[in-house]
């Protein structure tokens, strides 16, 4: 019910329209719900990018001041609250486990990053969309801030340098169309949750066949909209019951969030699907106009990785 998640999710739902670059909050909300409801038992915990952005946006040596060190502790506490199976005290170390996330590493482009501390390996999938490359040891790992991101992930989990030293980086890139990177990344994450991380003889990821992204966008829009509406409803109910706890959680910024929630409630009372309807209409039209979709989707959009379809994108094939 965190308004910092559901409020922007409602506002940015329109970015799930066909050929639009989608906002990261929608990816986080979608995949976090998928992990919690279906894939908790998989080897890869979902790591929301909202926690990685702290490291991406921080200046070098930002933790030198007491204020910044306090901010680090707060971020670790917030991260741990998202997962009831992690130690809740920020000074406690979590067990070594693999994590998967979707990151915007620059240029409004998403890629999938998998952190595997036990095997000392990091896989970066699809960071470059205009080239085909398969490489062991990413030469540009430092350039886009990879080491800083990995160091921050270790802080979130409470891992020491001795526990995770000697990480190798493997990269796989392919041609992409420039606007479906977000939905494609979501497809890749779910395919890895369902089928595992398939590697070739050199230890590089073998990409799966991927369905067209129209259906993925529509499925995400419907589910994310419902999650945001549920979060909005729970937030307003919680404000009446636990105002002090919520205020503390939101760093004493409750009033602004309440005002925004009330304004959204007024819109919902008049048009319950005001945010979803134009997105759904746009995508259903795109599906009917798409040659690939017409052969695989029959009005009712199902989850792409349980549907059997002969017409799928070969890995790396552009739409």
Image (cartoon, rainbow, N blue to C red):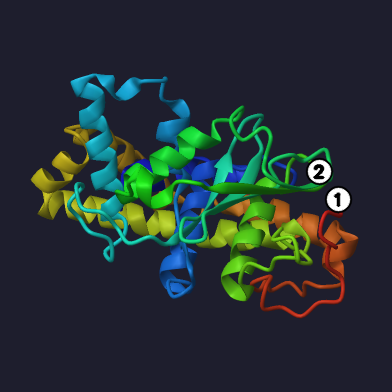
Q: Residue at x 79, y 67 (%)?
A: 209
- Residue 302, horizontal then vertical, whole percent: 66, 74
Q: Residue at x 77, y 75 (%)?
A: 298
- Decide: few, some or many residues near mark 1? Use Cα within 10 Å; few <14, some 14-19, many ≥20: some
- Residue 168, horizontal then vertical, whole percent: 58, 48
Residue 244, above or below 191: above
Pointer 2 with pointer 1, Cβ within 8 A:
yes
Q: Residue furthest right?
A: 291
Mark 2 vs mark 1, CA separation in Å: 6 Å
Q: Nearer the viewer, residue 129 or 148?
A: 148
- Decide: few, some or many residues near mark 2? Use Cα within 10 Å; few <14, some 14-19, many ≥20: few
Residue 54, above or below 81: above
- Residue 205, horizontal then vertical, whole percent: 70, 60
For disc 2, the marked residue is 177
Residue 31, above or below 52: below
Q: Residue at x 46, y 54 (%)?
A: 29
- Residue 249, horizontal then vertical, whole percent: 19, 43
Q: Nearer the viewer, residue 153 or 165?
A: 165
**In the drawing, does residue 253 fall left or right of residue 263?**
left
For disc 1, the marked residue is 318
**In the drawing, does residue 44 fall left or right of residue 240?**
right
Q: Nearer the viewer, residue 9 or 174?
A: 174
| Among the two numbered marks 2 and 1 on one chain, the one whose residue lies closer to the N terminus | 2
Q: Nearer the viewer, residue 159 or 14?
A: 159
């Amino acid at each position: 019910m965190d308004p910092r998640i559901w409020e922007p999710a409602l506002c940015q739902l329109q970015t799930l329209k066909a050929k639009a670059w989608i906002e990261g909050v929608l990816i986080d909300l979608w995949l976090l719900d998928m992990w919690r409801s279906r894939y908790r038992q998989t080897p890869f915990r979902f790591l929301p990018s909202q926690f990685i952005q702290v490291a991406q946006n921080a200046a070098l040596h930002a933790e030198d001041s007491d204020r910044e060190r306090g901010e680090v502790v707060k971020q670790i506490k917030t991260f741990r609250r998202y997962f009831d199976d992690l130690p809740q005290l920020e000074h406690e170390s979590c067990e070594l486990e693999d994590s998967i996330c979707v990151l915007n590493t620059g240029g409004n482009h998403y890629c999938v990053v998998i952190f595997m501390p036990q095997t000392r390996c990091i896989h970066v999938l699809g960071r470059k969309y205009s080239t085909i490359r398969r490489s062991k040891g990413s030469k540009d790992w430092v350039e886009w801030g990879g080491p800083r991101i990995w160091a921050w992930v270790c802080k979130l989990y409470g891992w020491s340098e001795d526990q995770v030293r000697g990480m190798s980086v493997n990269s796989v890139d392919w041609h992409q169309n420039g606007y479906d990177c977000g939905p494609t990344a979501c497809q890749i994450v779910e395919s890895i949750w369902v089928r595992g991380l398939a590697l070739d003889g050199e230890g590089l990821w073998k990409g799966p066949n991927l369905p067209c992204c129209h259906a993925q966008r529509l499925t995400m829009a419907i589910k994310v909209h419902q999650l945001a509406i549920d979060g909005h409803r729970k937030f307003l109910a919680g404000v009446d019951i636990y105002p002090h706890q919520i205020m503390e959680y939101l760093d004493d910024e409750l009033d602004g969030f309440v005002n925004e929630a009330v304004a959204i409630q007024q819109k919902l009372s008049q048009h319950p699907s005001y945010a979803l309807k134009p997105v759904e209409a746009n995508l259903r039209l795109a599906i009917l106009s798409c040659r690939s979709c017409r052969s695989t989707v029959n009005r009712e959009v199902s989850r792409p990785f349980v549907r059997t379809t002969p017409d799928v994108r070969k890995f790396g094939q552009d739409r």
